Amino acid sequence: MFNLTPVVKNLLLINVAVFGASYLLGLYGEVIQLFALYSINSDNFRAWQFVTYMFLHADLWHLFGNMIGLIIFGTWLEEVWGSQRFLQYYLITGLGAAVLFMGVELVEMRGMRQDVEAFMLEPDPNSFELVVTEHFESLYARNYSNINPLIRAYGDAPDDGELERAAKIKVEQLYMATVNIPMLGASGAVFGVLLAAGLLFPYRRIMLLFPPIPMRARVLIFFYGAYEIYALFQRTPNDQIAHMAHVGGMLVGFILLSMWGEARNRYQ
């Protein structure tokens, strides 16, 4: 069905092999802990994770979505660029997406840690609820039945020492849980590939899977990019997608295309 180019084929095999082997050998958790990208504030952080994270995936749908994008659009690019340049582009956009994601996360984490420390120094029910709902919104939403009773109880008895200690413990648990949420997946690099395909092959038509309708590449990439920017600023509590990495991959891809003098080139 697909005439795979060499680098695309090898990237596909590596991603599928890592995913399959980690599950079949029962080592998925250990692989994630070593090779997914953790916050610099986490004890699990290792420098090599800036590269290795892009070869890991959370589940079959995550893997399938990224690999379909790589197969279709990566093949277009490798055919006109050659294997060496395409691999450089893929790895640089993936690395750049990780660096930008980490930079934004560090800024957010700094503010979060300051508020956590302020609550620890001067705990009270209002600041407890504010810290939990503002900084740990997704964890709060997923653990509402566990956390909300403590918020209400502490609010009803602000001088209760046991409730104060419980609130402090809960805030520290939520902070550590947030710090230890890893990023993984080829999406940053794949979104860099999508951007390049949309710019260099704007009039080439593709058939969408869902729904099965034809669309020009530039239209598809425009909607993808617009959605990711929207989702980045309108994150919902249960949204676990690293939209900053997607936007970062596209941004680094555009910069790289401009540096290479490719941004204005068009191919059939």
Image (cartoon, grey):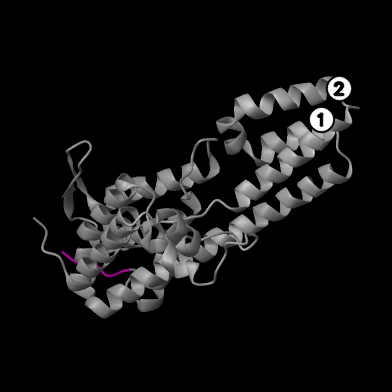
**Relative side of 215 to 26, left or right:** left
Classify the position of the N terminus by image quarter.
bottom left
Residue 157 numbered tag? 2
Instruction: Quickly name the residue at label 1.
Output: 163
| Tag 2 secondary structure | loop
**Relative side of 264 to 242, left or right:** left
Q: Position of residue 195 (x, y in %)?
A: 34, 59
Q: In the depicted view, which residue is nearer to us: 99 or 264?
A: 99
> Going by the picture, which residue comes out furthest to the right?
159
> Going by the picture, which residue comes out furthest to the top?
156
Classify the position of the C terminus by image quarter.
bottom left
Q: Is residue 86 magenta?
A: no
Residue 184 numbered tag? none
**Relative side of 223 to 76, left or right:** right
Q: Position of residue 54 (x, y in %)?
A: 40, 62
> Going by the picture, which residue comes out furthest to the front?
25
Q: In the depicted view, which residue is nearer to us: 237 or 160?
A: 160
Q: Quick check: marks 1 and 2 in contact, CB under 8 Å?
A: yes
* First in sequence: mark 1 vs mark 2: 2
Q: Is residue 59 above or below residue 161?
A: below
**Which residue is depicted at the point 21% across and 59% down?**
71
Q: Position of residue 38 (x, y in %)?
A: 55, 59
Instruction: Write the start and end of the magenta stretch as one range.
Output: 264-268
Characterize the magenta stretch by its predominant secondary structure: loop
Q: In the depicted view, which residue is nearer to us: 127 or 222?
A: 127
Q: In the depicted view, which residue is nearer to us: 190 or 37?
A: 37
**Which residue is depicted at the point 58% across and 53% down?**
180
**Relative side of 182 to 209, left or right:** right
Q: Position of residue 211 (x, y in %)?
A: 21, 36
Amino acid at pointer 1: Leu
Give the distance between the C-alpha atoms of the residues marked 1 and 2, in whole angstroms: 8 Å
